[in-house]
Amino acid sequence: MKLDLGKFYLAANPSKTLDIGKAEDRPYYIDFSPVRGASIIKELERTITRLSPNQPTCQLFTGHIGCGKSTELLRLKYHLEQQGFHIVYFESSKDLVMADVDITDVLLAIARQVSESLEQAKVNLQPRGFQALLQGAWKILQTEIEVSAAASIPNIGKININTEDKKLSLGVGIGEISVKAKNSPELRSKLRQYLEPRTDNIIELINKELLEPAIKLLKQQGKQGLVVIVDNLDRVDNSPKPTGRTQPEYLFVDRGEQLKSLKCHLVYTIPLVLSFSNDQGMLSNRFGIDPKLLPMVRVRSRNGSDYAQGMGLLRQMVLARAFPNLDEKQRLKLIPELFDSAESLDRLCRVSGGHARNLLVLLYGCLQKDDPPFSRNCLEDVIRRQRDALVRAVDEQEWELLFQVKRQQLVKGEDEYHTLMRSMFVFEYQDEEGGWFSINPILAEARQLQ
C-alpha cells in the first residue's frame, strides 16, 4: 500500500486531538489503557452509568499536559453517548483567561455551554431568573464601557447596550458578557464584584432553571441523563490569588464544594500539581473522591528494560497515523515505508517516554526535515535538537534533583513537581506496584546525567 504523504502529515500534527466520535478519527485511535496501569476512562464511565446513573456525580481527572487526556475524555463522551446520555463537552480555555480564573467564570462557562447544547438538542427552557441576573451584569458592563468611552473621548456620548431589547438566548447572552469580560481585566473585575456575592444564587439558578428541567426533558426524549465534561481546567495558571492561595488551590480546594454542587454528572480536569500539594487530602474530602490520574504509556519497566506491550502499542500509534485503515499485522509489514529500519521506529518510541504528544512532536520533526522513509540520521538530529533545548533549561540545582529521581524514582511535594514535571524533565508511570517516576528519556541521555 502506498503512503498518502498529505494525510500522514495532517495525522501526525501534534496539535491535533483525536475525537473517536468522528468516524474519520476512529482508525487513528490506539487504546493504551492496558499499559497505563488502569482503565481510567472505564472507571469514570462506570461511576456515571453503573454506580449512580440517576444521581449527580462529580469526578476529577488529571495528568501531564499532552499525555492524551482530551483524547480520552472525547472517548468517554462517545461511549456515554452510545449509552443514551446527553453530553456537553467543552474546552474551558476557549471561554476563560487561564491566568485569571474565578469560580463564577467557571459557573457561567458551564451555564453557557449547557444552554447552547440544549438549544441544539431542541430542549427549550425559560430561565427567567438567570435572564434577570444577566440583565444586572449587562448594566455593570454598560456603565463601565460608557465611563471608559467618555474618559477617552469626552464628547462621544453613551454606548447603547439596551438589555431590555435583547432577544438573546441564555447561551448567547452569557457568551457576549464573557467575551467583553475576557478582553478586559477591568471589566472582568467589575463583573466579579457583581457576581461573587451571588455565587450561591447562580448555582441555584443553574440547578433549578437549567439542569433539573433539562434532565427531565431529556429523559422524556429517551435520554439517560446529562453529563458535563469540562476539559482544560488543568491548564489554570499556578499564580497566586490576592489571598496568597494559588489558583488551583482556590478553585478546587477552597471553592470545591460549590463546583460540585451542580446537579448533573460532572467531570473536571484539574492541574496535576494538586496531586503533589499538602491540600490533596482536603481536595479529596471536598469532592468525596480521589482524582483519577492518567499516567504515561509504559515503554520501560522500573528496572529500565523495555516493556514489550507498551512498545508494541506505540509502534501501532505511529503506523496508524500513516496507515489508518490497515490492521496491526499489515501495518508492521509497512515499517520500511516510514523508517530505514524497525530499530529506528523503536528508537522513536523508546525516546518518547510514552508521552503521546512528545512522540508526535518527534515524528513531525522528521516530517519537517524529510520525506519517509526516515533515516536514522534524520531521527537522531531531531532527538538531538530537542535534548539540547531541554538541557539549556536545567540549572545546577535541578541536575541534583534529576540525579535524585534517577536513584529513587520519586518526586515529592509541590516544589519538585514545579521544577521537574511541569518542565517535562520527569514523567510518571503506573504498574502493578503503584506509581513511579523516571527522567524524560531524551534528557536522560544528556552527558550531565551520565
Image (cartoon, rainbow, N blue to C red):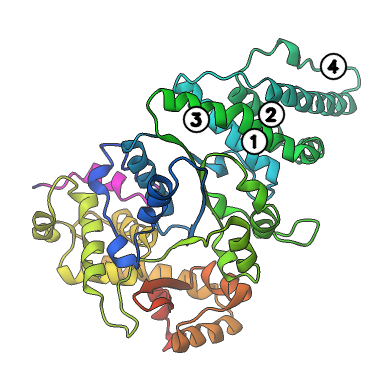
**Left or right of 314, for residue 280:** right
Circle 3 Cα neighbour tier, 10 Å, few/some/many (<14 / 14–19 / ≥20) = many
Question: Alpha carbon of mark 4 to alpha carbon of mark 3: how far?
Answer: 42 Å
CB within 8 Å, label 2 to label 1 = yes
What residue did someone put label 1 on? 108
* Drawn side of residue 11 relative to residue 405, left or right: left
- The residue indicated by pointer 4 is 158
User: Foreground mark, 2 or 1?
Assistant: 1
Gap between marks 2 and 1 measured at Cα: 10 Å
**What residue do we see at 42% from left, 81% from top?**
446
Q: Looking at the image, is mark 2 or mark 4 earlier in the sequence?
A: 4
Q: Is residue 419 above or below residue 238?
A: below
Amino acid at dot 3 = Ile
Q: Position of residue 40 (x, y in %)?
A: 39, 58
- Residue ID at (85%, 29%): 148
Give amino acid for label 2.
Ile
Q: Is residue 349 in the magenta section? A: no
Residue located beneath label 2 in the image: 177
State how far apart marks 2 and 4 are (Cα).
18 Å
First along the sequence among labels 2 and 1: 1
Given contact means CB atoms under 8 Å apart, are the residues at marks 2 and 3 in contact?
A: no
Question: Callout 4 environment at 10 Å: few (<14), some (14 to 19), or many (20+)?
Answer: few
Secondary element at image label 3: helix
For mark 3, what is the residue?
215
Snapshot quadrant of residue 172: top right
Three-letter amino acid code at the position of disc 1 = Leu
- Mark 1 or 3, nearer chain start: 1
Identify the amino acid type marked 4: Lys
- Span colored in magenta: 2-15
The residue carrying pointer 1 sits among few (fewer than 14), some (14 to 19) or many (20 or more) residues within 10 Å by Cα, namely many
